[in-house]
Image (tube, rainbow, N blue to C red):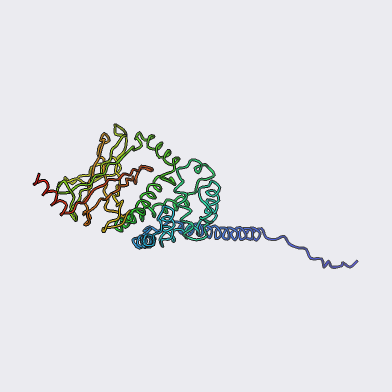
Amino acid sequence: MASVPNDTAVEEPEDAGTVIATVISVVLTAAVLWTAFSFRMYRKAKDAARAAKPDATGPTHKDIEYVRDLIAEQAATGKQVTKETLLRDIASAPAMVTLGNKAVYAVPRKLRKLHALLLKKGVIGADIAVPDGGEGAVRLLLAYQLHSSLEALLQKDARLDAVVAELQVAAADGALFILPSLYEASIKGKWLQPALATLALQVCLRSGLWSELDPKCVDIARAQLEGQGAPYPDVSLRLTAKSWMGQPNISPGTMIEVGVAVERAHAGASRAKYQKKVPTREGTLKPVMETYSCLVSRESDTEGGSKGSIVGTVDVDVFDVMQEEARSTLKMVAPKQPGKYELRVDLRSAIVLGVRAETTCAFEVVSTEALAAQHQDDDYD
């Protein structure tokens, strides 16, 4: 019987090495893709963090000049300069806008969340919108800084991450860099109200409190000091004006010595820390336990300036906590027109929130003719 050939092909098993190579290829491809994706995400996060970091230089003198020009324009047109207007002006400075733009680029969702939180807590109003630009972001960060001492905002769900916290500090530092120069510019321009506003904003930013007048803020500042073993300052003022040459009367155009005395009802032993140091003649630095900025202004119009214009400023320093009184003086030229005049002094602390005092004093400028007539009467008597 003839055999019939079998045409059915028999499939040989695949080589084991080929299977292993295929698996390895797939795994390596997946690993390469995952590594590339991870590296891309890492670079994106790194770029965002770098963009969020504030410029190392921060605001410059150009930013100071920018805000100073805004204040000068407001003062010239009679517009009131307040902490709120100062905040808006500072937030619009070029370097601050750059900082805000970095914040918007890096953490837009966190800024929106912070805005919603502050709005819910009643910390900000409708005038501060959801930040979509640099100026709005800076205003939001400064608003948070001005309320950072509130325990209600320090709850777990309200805490900021490291990037936002860094931006908040950078915004506050930028404002505190600009403000002292604005204060000096206000003094030079003889603008009392803007000068007081700059001092108020400085102490509020440093304290993390929104108002130097709100009793709640003052109570928080008082509690913070007492926790450090230091009393909250209780001060009052005395203001005097007399002839610099020691004459019994003040003549037109002569020098007047204005004396400012700060009385300290809280004098006594304490664990208070010094607020600054000043150089001595020996070349050393002497600690100042308390320092007060005193702004002397006109309470009546003269040819030298209108009511409310600054005559001069003095810093009254306290070197010993046991001191019951500290004094300082400044000199000014008497009005050329005889008559009765009045001066005012406003005391503020740029260190302790809520410390303030005001008082006035009157003086008379006597004409040379009146003085001569008085001398004649005295000679006649």
Q: Residue at x 54, y 50 (%)?
A: 119
Q: Residue at x 72, y 60 (%)?
A: 13
Among the 4 quarters of the image, the one containing residue 32: bottom right
Position of 145 relative to 231 (above/below)? below
Residue 264 coordinates in the image, percent (x, y)? 29, 37
On-image quarter of the N terminus: bottom right
Among the 4 quarters of the image, the one containing residue 112: bottom right
Residue 245 coordinates in the image, percent (x, y)? 14, 49
Q: Residue at x 40, y 61 (%)?
A: 95
On-image quarter of the C terminus: top left
Query: Is residue 246 found left or right of 137 in the rendered image?
Result: left
Question: Front-most of 35 and 151?
Answer: 151
Residue 307 coordinates in the image, percent (x, y)? 32, 54
Position of 100 relative to 238 (above/below)? below
Question: Front-most of 353 and 280?
Answer: 353
- Residue at the limit of the structure toward the front, as seen here: 380
Position of 72 relative to 370 (above/below)? below
Question: Front-most of 325 and 34?
Answer: 325
Residue 22 coordinates in the image, percent (x, y)? 64, 60
- Residue at the limit of the structure toward the left, as seen here: 379
